Image (spheres, helix red, strand yellow):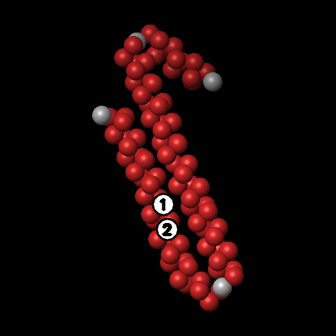
Amino acid sequence: MEAIARIAAAAAADPAEAKNTAAAASAGYAYGLAAIGPGIGIGYLVGKAVESMARQPEAAGMVRTTMFLGIAFTEALALIGFVVFILLKFA
């Protein structure tokens, strides 16, 4: 909590520093929100894949391949959110 108080005090002293602090905080918050969806999606995807492999063990190879493709595409959403975060921070 002391670190937050020091940042707030420094931001109050210099308006340009206040703008930079607010931009960094809002960009970090936006990336956090952008990471929630892919996290939930990957958890759901892996859970259903494990359930599918438990029900039909002979199809485990095909399910595993499809699961990894789904994870890659879902993780791409988090990376896009990170790129947007970088663009907002430095643009």
Q: Residues within 10 Å of mark 1 (few under 14, many from 20)?
A: some
- Seen in the image, is 59 located left or right of residue 79? right
User: What residue is at 44 percent from the left and 35 percent from the top?
Assistant: 27
64 relative to 36, above or below = below
Q: Position of residue 40 (x, y in %)?
A: 59, 55
Occupied quadrant, residue 73: bottom left
As rendered, which of 58 and 11 lies closer to the eye?
Answer: 58
Kindly identify the amino acid type of the residue bearing the numbered disc 2: Gly
**Which residue shows up at 47% across the image and 12% down it?**
12
Q: Which residue is mark 2?
A: 70
Q: Secondary structure under badge 2?
A: helix
In percent of the image, x 61 and y 21: which residue is there?
2
The residue positioned farthest toward the bottom in the image shown: 58
Q: Position of residue 35 (x, y in %)?
A: 52, 48
- Residue 75 or 20: which is nearer the viewer? 75
3D distance between C-alphas at marks 1 and 2: 6 Å
**Quadrant of the rendering where the N terminus is positioned:** top right
Q: Quick check: marks 1 and 2 in contact, CB under 8 Å? A: yes
The kind of residue on which mark 1 rests is: Thr
Q: Return the x and y of residue 7 as percentages of the image width and height.
A: 51, 20
Q: Residue farthest to the left?
A: 91
The numbered mark at residue 74 is 1
Q: Quadrant of residue 60?
A: bottom right
Q: Which secondary structure, mark 1?
A: helix
Percent coordinates x, y for residue 20 in the rendering: 40, 24
